[in-house]
Image (cartoon, rainbow, N blue to C red):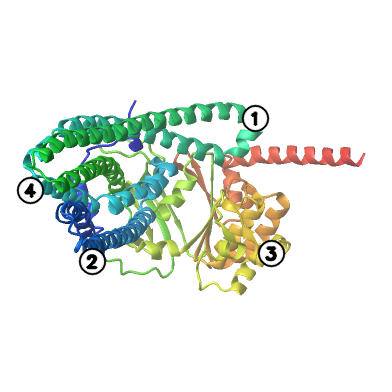
Amino acid sequence: MAQHDDEILGKAYDARLMRRLLAYLRPYWRQVALAFVAITLGAAMALAQPYLMKVAIDQHIATGDLDGLGSLALLYLGVLVLGFVSEYIQTWTMQLTGQRIMFDIRMGIYRHLQRLDVRYYDHNPVGRLMTRVVSDVDVLNDLFTSGVVTIFGDVFTLLGIMAMMLVMNWRLALVAFAALPLIAIVTQWFRKNVRESYRVVRGWIARINAFLQENITGMSTVQLFRREALNFVRFDDIDKKHRDANIDSIFYYAVFYPAIEAIGALTSALIIWYGGASVLRESLSLGALAAFLQYSQRFFRPISDMSEKFNVLQSAMASSERIFKLLDEPVHIQSPAAASRHITAGHIRFENVWFAYNAHPGAEPDWVLRDISFEVRPGQRLGVVGATGSGKTTLINLLLRFYDVQRGRISIDGIDVRELDLHELRGLFSLVLQDVHLFSGTIADNIRLGNAAISDEQIRQAAVAVHANQFIERLPGTYAAPVAERGSTLSVGQKQLLSFARALAFDPRVLILDEATSSVDTETEILIRDALGALMARRTTIAIAHRLSTIQDMDNILVLHKGVLRESGTHQELLGLRGIYYKLFELQYKQDARLTQLQSGAEQLARS
């Protein structure tokens, strides 16, 4: 079984990734320099404190000379204050810088996500992409705030302590350093096991996120089919394994830090044993012994800190690898470098178009469209019908350049769509889908979609044209009424009416309807058809229809079957052929008649 991306840790340190990460620090080099100075100053203040204690004991307390002790105490207090100030500056500066870098990275990821092809989203679940934008960026924040710069402070402190101990008494320093092999063994054990533990915890977090996203989104289905108990048991199993993995990681932390403390205590005992004897032999001063004890206590703190920062570095390398993999994903569909030509009439032509979603070099594609050719003149109304999977919606995806054709070409006014600016190309169209997507906000926001050029009056006129105003004006707040996530407080028909109003408010040159009335009741469909009749008279319309009644008055109707254009003509011409369209019409007519009969029977039963 292949590992999920979120479970893979990769290298503990990758110079290539680190160079790319440090590039985000460059705009804030002044803040980084200030933090580095503050860290260095703080480390120097930490080194000065035991040495001042040595001076106080040897030169004043042990000799009984109290004249300079007050000044030394004030100096010690100044060192403490300066250490506090430097710690504050370092923490504030790096946390602020980390937040700004997080902002930059997230904006970069989101900008790239908006440019990526629709094909990319066909193969990458939303939950994984959300993990990149949220969790992985948070991990990088830990690296920038407590890893990249502060580790220099730990190294400086560690080397400074070793230098001070060697200068004061190299024999006693070697006694203190005798514990280093134990430190190395414990640290290596901790890093190895915590690394594996982190991988397991992250894997179970990914499973929890995926489970929650899938089941919360489909909660209505869960409740309808009474799967609550079964899903609870499944989530309980995943959650228990996540808990147990966390408990395992807690064990390693619970052993590591007490072990470091125990080794520190052992080192202090060795210093007292050897140093005490040296004091009695008068080869070491009492102040130096006290300073040694303080230095030894400070000696193990940066070691444990650096062990913890190793985990931060490990996590950051894994997160950055995933983030940069996303950012390096190529954008295949984009505007050409010199897209200077503009559309005038809007004459659409499909010329021998072949397309497959799974086209890979060296493999025979599973063609969704095969040698499709047709045209739509400006102002013409085109209907497209066919069984599910015949390629109807694919035509629209190719026309809007959500995907590019493998063979043939699609042109507008004789210009290949691949040579047009994407913004201009897609600005020609308004698309109304069967599955309407509404955003959190207000009714007006969902019609305007952030286009400040669309006035409130235009929004109202568009709503009136599709009869959406009838339900909007009954809502509290009317056009300022809030819309819940995915429009969950609105009916399917109301959401489709809003999507019609949205499309019309943008006043497109080409109106595309992708089975847009399939979920609307008959009465509402008649109202929409009346509104669209007037609107289609002055703009090109392409309507993909499930109900043939909605496209009977089209200027031309295409009949697709298994990706092939099998029939073309007006409604009457296609019926005269007695082919696929005739069979579809006959089948649907019988279904509608049966439905009408059932409705009539239900009404008679209700009256009786």
Confirm or deny contact between disc 4 and disc 2 (CB under 8 A).
no
Q: Which mark is residue 469?
A: 3
Labels 2 and 1: the sequence-earlier one: 2
Q: Amino acid at mark 3?
A: Asn
**Residue 58 image point, x, y percent:** 15, 52
Camera-side mark, 2 or 1: 2
Label 4 sits on residue: 167
Q: Nearer the viewer, mark 4 or mark 1?
A: 4
Q: Label 4: how many residues lie within 10 Å, few (<14), some (14-19) or many (20+)?
A: few
Label of residue 30 in the image:
2
Q: Is residue 106 left or right of residue 154?
A: right
Check disc 1 and report the residue beneath it: 226
Spatial CA distance of label 4 from label 3 is 86 Å
- Asked if residue 366 is positioned above or below residue 332 in the image, the reply reads above
Residue drawn at the location 28% of the way across and 31% of the way down: 259
Look at the image and tell me whether residue 103 can be seen: yes
Q: Quadrant of the N terminus?
A: top left
Asked if residue 334 is positioned above or below residue 345 in the image, the reply reads: above
Mark 4: secondary structure? helix
| N-term mark: 4 or 3 | 4
Measuring from the top left, give residue 494's x and y in whole percent. Answer: 66, 55
In contact (CB < 8 Å): disc 2 and disc 3? no
Give the mark toward the camera: 4 or 2.
Answer: 4
How many labels, in total?
Answer: 4
Spatial separation of the CA atoms under disc 2 and disc 3: 56 Å
Residue sitting at the far front = 64
Q: Nearer the viewer, mark 4 or mark 3?
A: 4
